[in-house]
Image (cartoon, rainbow, N blue to C red):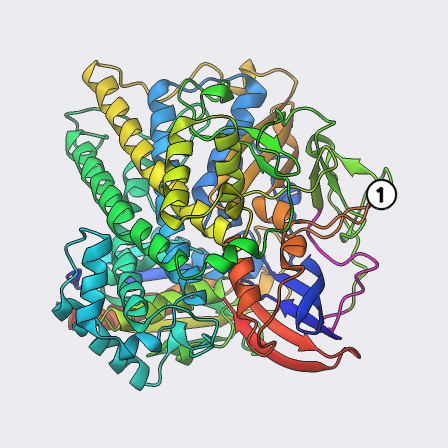
Amino acid sequence: MARMVVDPITRIEGHLRIEAVVENGTITDAYSAGTMVRGFEKILKGRDPRDAWAFTERACGVCTTVHALASVRTVEDALGITVPRNAELIRNLMFCTQYVQDHVVHFYHLHALDWVDVVSSLSADPQKTAQIATSISSWPKSSPKYFAAVQQKLKAFVESGQLGIFANGYWGNPSYKLPPEVNLLAVTHYLEALEWQKEIVKIHTIFGGKNPHPNYLVGGVPCSINPDEVNAINMDRLNYVGSLISGAIAFVEQVYLPDLLAIAGFYKDWAAIGGGLKNYLAYGDLPTRGYGQPDYFKFARGAILDRNLNEVYPVDGHNSGEIKEYIEHSWYSYSSGESSGLHPFDGETEFNYTGPKPPYDQLNVEAKYSWLKTPRWKDHPMEVGPLARLLVSYAKGSTEVKDVVNEALGQLGVPITALFSTLGRTAARGLETRLVVHWMKGFYDDLITQIKSGEVSTFSRDKWEPSTWPATAQGVGLTEAPRGALAHWIKIKDGKIDNYQLVVPSTWNASPRDPKGQRSAYEASLIGTHLANPEQPLEILRTIHSFDPCIACAVHLYDPEGKHLHQISVY
Amino acid sequence: MTECSGNLLVLGIGNVLMGDEGVGVHVVRHLEQLGVPPGVEVLDGGTGSFLLLDPMQRAGKIILIDATLDGNPAGTVRRLTPRFSTDYPRTLTAHDIGLKDLLDTFYLLDHPLDVVLFAISIASLQPIGLELSPEIEARVPEYAQLALAEIGSAIPQMS
């Protein structure tokens, strides 16, 4: 028996380390540990609640806008502010922009190389690649000459010895199942996606003033609409946004989705691997009648237990009996005791590091072993992310979601239970991108209709001044980051932040065990996975990447005595 | 392929929530106060990774300011002219891989970058917080002057 340590280095948001027990090539247990401390409360306490978004936005370089969105919603919820319809539509457009860009980048640049063999693509016949491309899509850039040119460029890049982002792949590993021609198709679109993604994010600059880290505003959005004014959101800019959305629809429909389904067709065995937890949580988002009416969100709110799609439980972020964070295995202490759970309104952030001094070989997983707290919904461990979102909306009967999901399942010839897997997670991300990019067009059309009818308000000033606030107030801002359910909680006292807590998607998915010994999503998803070659743990990459962590990992392998055997880098 | 505008981009990278890790951003904020010649774009890149592709692609030359954990005494600044991502200091701290991924993509897109990197050594284990350590804080104006001097020598070659 070997003990294996997956020790992700920081990507953008924090460090993650996974220790897995491997028996006869199969993972029998796993522990997930966040090794970088968070302490937002300490930065935010005593500040103006209206400024909190600008700090929380820096929590993660990838999820910038959703942290800002959660933050302004939290304050609005506490103070009873309703934003104008235009602000809701613009926030939705910002949200959709991030989803489409982030999911495309995740698929092509962070996850595809777990399934696509770059080196194999060098031996592809460009003629055949062109045939495959035109058989699955009407995307114009599909000529044999075009694929041959990309192949030449790749050859030169590989021969330069500067493999760069391709340096860490397990090229030639037998777990890669795609024919060379499909590999070439995917690598070509890897390059196209790079160029494409930089266009769509210009929507953040247009509505948010700058990028990265666009501006938000409590009570609305920080841009004024005036169809004829040079410095405002005018018709020129709106037309440009419209053209970017049309381009996004084309890319998602003609490149991302066909590639996803073509690649998935070669990896159907992964529809039975990596399922892990059976509980799914989504806060939902994309309001159409205001944040206060979740029944009219495009992404539904709710919880599913034991994969029972016939019942969706309501979720309430304010209810102190629902979401709680535990610290029995986390480096914090609670005044109420080690095994108690605290609702984020009453959350405490007292550090209590009891782990080994870095660098170390192994954590003592019987004791505290992570800087992440362990969130639970009604004491259940929950998976969050694209799969949870789709399942909750599907189970709640959204016809839009059901149509898109059922069409893809039909094309692949797999039942809905195939979604409870690594492949299902990756497919769900693409399917929701398809939904989101069309919803985006709808929000854009609604915004244009509003403006044409003379409605240009983007900000509600009623409760901007602290003098209008009660002495104490508390609120919760729920949203869905691309990686899953995200919430901020605030307590305001005398116009200042008294407590501020974030529960981020990675906390749900990557947290350590709770006091009952229940595993969280990462830990559960790895159990039972067979490693064809422990020196090249491609299987771990596939499953962990299917959650879209914004972190990179170094994988360490250990023998039963804890001796270090092997280390690789995982992005 | 995006046409290169020939502009000069000064890009500060880092996470301002993590003390000295955010020194690159502090330096560009200081530069903005000092003012830069016309045609020079100053950008707080945060930890933006792929989001920075467009501004970097549009630039003819990039002056990158970033923190590094290279083992040198905190505050040490080195001027580097890296060609490939492997030429960069091994650990660009908490935003390491995002930036390196991005740099490699330029070679893939036939768009090699002209980069001058000011790598500022910081101590490891940055506590979470908005403030720089006193020794780094005191040297921010000096780093900004280094960037200004670099701008001054780059501009005649740009047009």
Q: Name the residue under label 1.
A: A339
Which residue is at the front of the view, A163 or A534? Answer: A534
Q: In this view, does B54 lie to the left or right of A298?
A: left
> Where's the N terminus of chain B, which quadrant?
bottom left
Q: Main secondary structure of the magenta part?
A: loop
Q: Would you call the spot at circle 1 few (<14 residues within 10 Å), some (14-19), or many (20 or more)?
A: some
Q: Is A311 above or below relative to A240?
A: above
**Residue A284 in view of the camera:** no
Q: Quadrant of residue A289?
A: top left
Q: In this view, does A222 lie to the left or right of A566?
A: left
* Residue B88 drawn at (x, y percent): 42, 76
Identify the chain of the residue marked 1, using the numbered disc in the image: A
Secondary element at image label 1: loop
**Residue B40 in view of the camera:** yes
* Residue A193 drawn at (x, y percent): 29, 57
- The residue sitting at 55% across, 39% down in the picture is A485
**Amino acid type, label 1:** Ser
Residue A369 painted magenta: yes
Which residue is at the front of the view, B126 or A436? Answer: A436
Q: In which quarter of the image is residue B31?
A: bottom left
What span is colored magenta in the figure? Answer: A357-373
Which residue is at the front of the view, A14 or B117? Answer: A14
- The residue sitting at 47% across, 26% down in the picture is A397
* Residue A1 drawn at (x, y percent): 75, 75
- The residue sitting at 32% across, 56% down in the picture is A259
Taking the view exactly as shown, the residue that stands out farthest to the right is: A337
Q: Is residue B56 left or right of residue A98?
A: left
> Where's the C terminus of chain B, which quadrant?
bottom left
Residue A166 painted magenta: no
Q: Is A405 above or below relative to B2?
A: above
Q: Quadrant of residue A115?
A: bottom left
* Residue A188 drawn at (x, y percent): 26, 65
